[in-house]
Amino acid sequence: MSHLLHLDASARPGLAGQDLHGSHSRNLSQRFVSQWLARRAQDNVTYRDIGQNPPSFIDHDWIAAAFTPEPQREQWMRDTLAESDLLVDELLAADVLVIGTPLYNFGMPAALKAWVDQIVRAGRTVDIDTSNPLDPYVAKLADRPRHLVILSARGGIGFGPGGEMAHMNHLEPNLITALDFIGITRVHQIAIEGQEFGGELLAASVEQALHKVDALVVELQQALQTERTPEPA
């Protein structure tokens, strides 16, 4: 049985095509999860709407608590890290992390950045080996295969790899760097483009993305099955 962690980061609460000013990234992520469960109803999904309920920004108290060794933490430090601990626990339990997010001003929404800052934690998701200054970081989520699925929506066009605007896209590259750092290295990306143009251009992009989502669900379910099937002795 697989476990999915599904995050939506859009500030728009509704779904594109159903609600006024609905979210295209939410439409993609809901499609992914619904298709997944249609094929594997026994799997578990944890859902967190960080677009509507953003995680806390880290502050002085968070930093002081996170970098104090656990046995030495005072109660206020444990209380400060309680939200982060919950978010990290959700991530640790997941085989597939599904993130639905728009591209805002060439990067990720602030709510998604707040989530990243809460889950990149020394001692929880990454260890620091001070005896090896040239390569001190040890990714703790590399203990087993985990997949990252980024389902994004962009107002313009050409922001994908090789596109004319790719150098201005700091959404997927930022997410991939941060999550690779803690050990999530199997990455899959699907995007909708052209929201600012609308019409046939947007409609074609949406249709293509939905087909890719359906195909990716099949691909990942097969991959997880293969990864869990022990090789003959």
Image: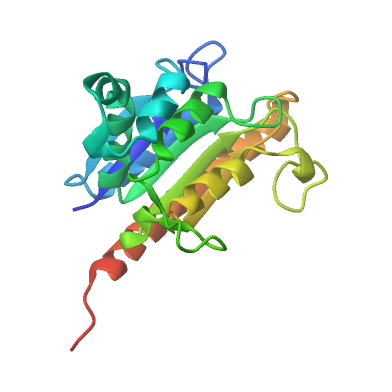
Looking at the picture, does residue 179 appear above or below residue 170? below
Q: How many marks?
A: 0
Question: Foreground: 199 or 115?
Answer: 115
Q: Image quadrant of residue 144?
A: bottom left
Q: Work out which quarter of the rendered image holds the C terminus and state it.
A: bottom left
Pinpoint residue 107: horizontal percent, then vertical percent: 65, 32
Residue lying at the far top in this picture: please name it: 20
Pinpoint residue 213: horizontal percent, then vertical percent: 47, 46
Residue at 51% x, 43% y: name it.
150
Judged left or right of residue 198, residue 149 is left
Judged left or right of residue 106, residue 87 is left
Looking at the picture, does residue 201 appear above or below residue 59? below
Question: Foreground: 63 or 226?
Answer: 63
Pinpoint residue 155: horizontal percent, then vertical percent: 70, 27
Residue at 41% x, 27% y: name it.
64
Judged left or right of residue 178, residue 72 is left
Residue lying at the far bottom in this picture: please name it: 233
Residue at 57% x, 13% y: name it.
21
Residue 178 visible, this orientation? yes
Residue at 52% x, 17% y: name it.
11
Residue lying at the far right in this picture: please name it: 164
Residue 55 visible, this orientation? no
- Colour approach in the figure: rainbow
Pinpoint residue 112: horizontal percent, then vertical percent: 50, 28
Looking at the picture, does residue 43 appear above or below residue 67? below
